[in-house]
Image: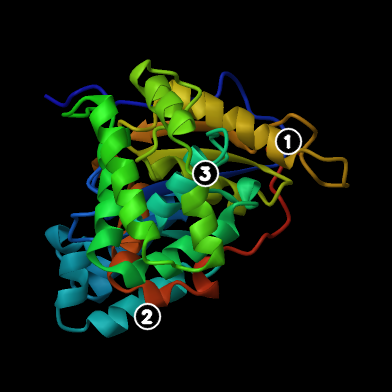
Amino acid sequence: MRSPLQGGLPPTGAVAGAVVEIACDESGFSGTNLLHSTAPVITHASVDLAVDEAVALITALRSGFRFSPHEFKSGHFLRRSGADEALEWFLAALTGRAHVHLIDKEFFLVTRIVDFLLSEPSYAAGTRLARDRHPAALALHEAGRSAGSDWAAFLSAFVDMVRMKRRLPADRTVRWFFQARDALRRHRLGVAADAVLDGLDPGRVRALVARLDGDDRSVPPPLEPLLPALAETVLSWSDGRRRVLVTHDEQSALTADRLTRLQRVLAAGVGGSVAGALPHAVSPLAGLVTVDSRDDPRVQVADLLAGVARRMPEIIDDRLRQPLPPARDPDG
């Protein structure tokens, strides 16, 4: 017997206006194990295929390229003979119908440090809606990697400090974080990177950790990359002018509370008065339904695409960034 599905935020009623329905899955997600995973990147893939289109694509792969059911995973897909031809066909079939968002886990941690410890944490952090601190994160990431073990220790100390199920007392992890910061600062990484390190204030950091320990839900989970990935996916498909209905493989991170907060942030960030744009305060995220991937062929296609893109990130080009055809209006 299967366990009940977790997460999701189904729409409360019919979604009016221009809407696109997408199915999503990820590859490389390792929970909070962002530094010690065998997968340094996470890919979040989405497709706007209808169910019958996804079934036809899967059927074509199995018949035309003789894939068996257990081979419809990226590892099997790329290892078998004829993989190059099958991959080229698969990508061509998804031209204009797919999008892939790639997350470098190490850089994601750097953005968390900058966005959470230097300003008020927000569900917009890590997305295009909060880009003002992005140059600082880039500078710290590029310079910090030259510091070797001190860089690794700094990132590891941050993870230990903000982990939801922390093994050590908060005061100790905060102290270790600043000891790691000071060791890294001695490398004199450059003006921009040093400014980030100098700007880390013990009082502000302790206050954030206290909020996390107090289950302040206005603070997004610091080590959860799936939420900003979902936000970027929705923003890409929406382009500020249509709403997005998401069907997603089950993920415990996608709770109703978090999705509601993300929905509000997206509404505040994209509303406008330009012709064709979403009305003010209308979120591009219309709702999200979780499914078991075994039951939805659209999610199976997204899963295969995500796995292939994680193993071969060079395939993420314009073919996997959907164009924006005239929006479909379900009422018209």
User: Number of labelled discs?
Assistant: 3
The amino acid type of the residue labelled 2 equals Glu
Corner quadrant of residue 247: top left
Q: Residue at x 50, y 50 (%)?
A: 198
Q: Residue at 87% across / 46% down in the picture?
A: 274
Location of the C terminus by quadrant is top right
Out of 60 and 116, give the one closest to the viewer.
116
Q: Residue at x 52, y 44 (%)?
A: 115
The mark nearer the N terminus, 3 or 1, is 1
Q: Which residue is mark 1?
A: 17
Q: In the rendered view, does 243 fall on the left or right side of 98?
A: right
Percent of width and height locating residue 60: 31, 68
Q: Position of residue 314 (x, y in %)?
A: 39, 77
Q: Marks 2 and 1, Cα distance to the nearest angstrom?
A: 35 Å
Q: Is residue 88 above or below residue 330?
A: below
- Neighbourhood count class around disc 2 (C-alpha, 10 Å): few under 14, some 14–19, many 20 upward: few
Asked if residue 45 can be seen in this view, the reply is yes
Q: Position of residue 31 (x, y in %)?
A: 25, 42
Q: Which mark is residue 88?
A: 2
Which sits in the foreground, 170 or 8?
170
What kind of residue is marked 3? Asp
Q: The N terminus lies in which quarter of the figure?
A: top left
Residue 110, numbered circle: none
Q: Where is residue 88? Give x, y as percent.
A: 37, 80
Residue 138 visible? The answer is: no
Label 3 or label 2, whichever comes before in sequence order? 2
**Disc 3: which residue:** 115
